[in-house]
Amino acid sequence: MGLETSAESPAAVRTVSHLLADWIGRLGSIWIEGQIAQISRRPGMRTAWVTLRDTDADLSLTVVTDVALLGATTPPLTEGQRVIVHGKPEFYEGRGTLQIRAREFRAVGRGALLEEIERLRALFEAEGLFAAARKRPLPFLPRRVGLISGRASAALTDVVENAERRWPAVTFEIREVAVQGASAVTAMVAALSDLNDVPEVDVIVIARGGGSVEDLLPFSNERLVRAVVASRVPVVSAIGHEKDVPLIDLVADLRASTPTDAAKRIIPDLAEEIALIAGARERTRRAVSRRLTAEVDLIDRQRRSLHRSLTSRITHGRHDLEHLVARLTALSPAATLERGYAVVRTLDGAVVRDVADISSGDHLGVRVAHGGFTVQVQDLG
């Protein structure tokens, strides 16, 4: 702007303000796209002030326009609507504020909105953000559930009440934020970042109870979609719609059809789990009982088999012993004596085997089958 200043020679506020107004005044008209966050009218005045918010960042501009110009758009402009504004930047010197003097408003139609969503869909798909391989499994029983939903909304109530009905001890970390309108994206992204900083949060649910295409636009916003992708913990999308599929559904780790369905998908049912445990316990009891019965039967069969084996061996052993006794009996000296033979010994116990071993007059002991006696040798033949 050609103004040279220093600490010793500063410029006055009025001078800077005038230079800014002059410089901005030389700018031409521009086209701006954004979302109407607020429309302010003062009674009796023909001027209206529109807060135009960026759809992807927490930034806004003030647009000054005639009230009649707002109503000239078909349909009339409303808060939350996406618009394209043709206007000229102005710097108001009195307050040092920048505003846009609107000359024309054009509502962004549904067709244009859907085209933008399709463009983002193709972009995200090309980046692989919809791939099943990057979806993370949910924890069986979260330590704490992060929940992002509208303030005092039915969606919030549905998630909490159904989850507590299934598992009474479940705990939530809840962030109630705008889920519709110009501030929705910024609010939800901030809530998602906040919940990711809570160590105990194991899963995050983003819930809303359905709505029109325009109402669901924040859930296809690139900034929110990328925040879901970057989340530290798994994210469940529970928008509660039927036909339309916001892009957040495609990148979330799990898509629930409704907030109630989300509660069922993230929290196990205590009664069902108790029934499963009881069933498993009963199946285990029956299996152990069958195994014990089978083992007892096996032991009983083995015992009977062992008894038969031992009986057979004892019988065979008895027969073998009887046979051996018979053989020993047949070979013993007693059996020989029973047949009429006798054993002759000298008085000192030596067996007489040869007549040459004795002399006439010797006394000898004679052993027969039943007793013994002493004889004297009288004649040696």
Image: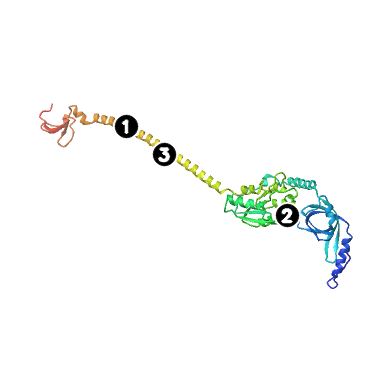
| Residue 358: quarter of image | top left
Callout 3 environment at 10 Å: few (<14), some (14 to 19), or many (20+)? few
Which residue in the protein does label 2 denote? Answer: 184
Amino acid type indicated by mark 2: Ala
Q: Is residue 341 above or below residue 39?
A: above
Q: Earlier in the sequence, mark 3 or mark 1?
A: 3
Please state if 321 lies on the left or on the right of 348 as rendered. Answer: right
- How far across and how far down the image is residue 346, in percent? 15, 34
Please state if 236 lies on the left or on the right of 287 as rendered. Answer: right
Residue at screen point 41% across, 39% down: 296
- How far across and how far down the image is residue 363, in percent? 12, 34
Q: Viewer-proximal residue, 213 or 195?
A: 213
Callout 2 environment at 10 Å: few (<14), some (14 to 19), or many (20+)? many
Q: Which mark is residue 334?
A: none
The answer to whether mark 1 and mark 2 are in CB contact below 8 A is: no
Which residue in the protein does label 1 denote? Answer: 315
Which residue in the protein does label 3 denote? Answer: 296
Amino acid type indicated by mark 1: Thr
Q: Nearer the viewer, mark 3 or mark 1?
A: 3
- Mark 2 secondary-structure assignment: helix
Q: Earlier in the sequence, mark 2 or mark 3?
A: 2
Q: Is residue 146 visible?
A: yes
Q: Viewer-proximal residue, 327 or 265?
A: 265
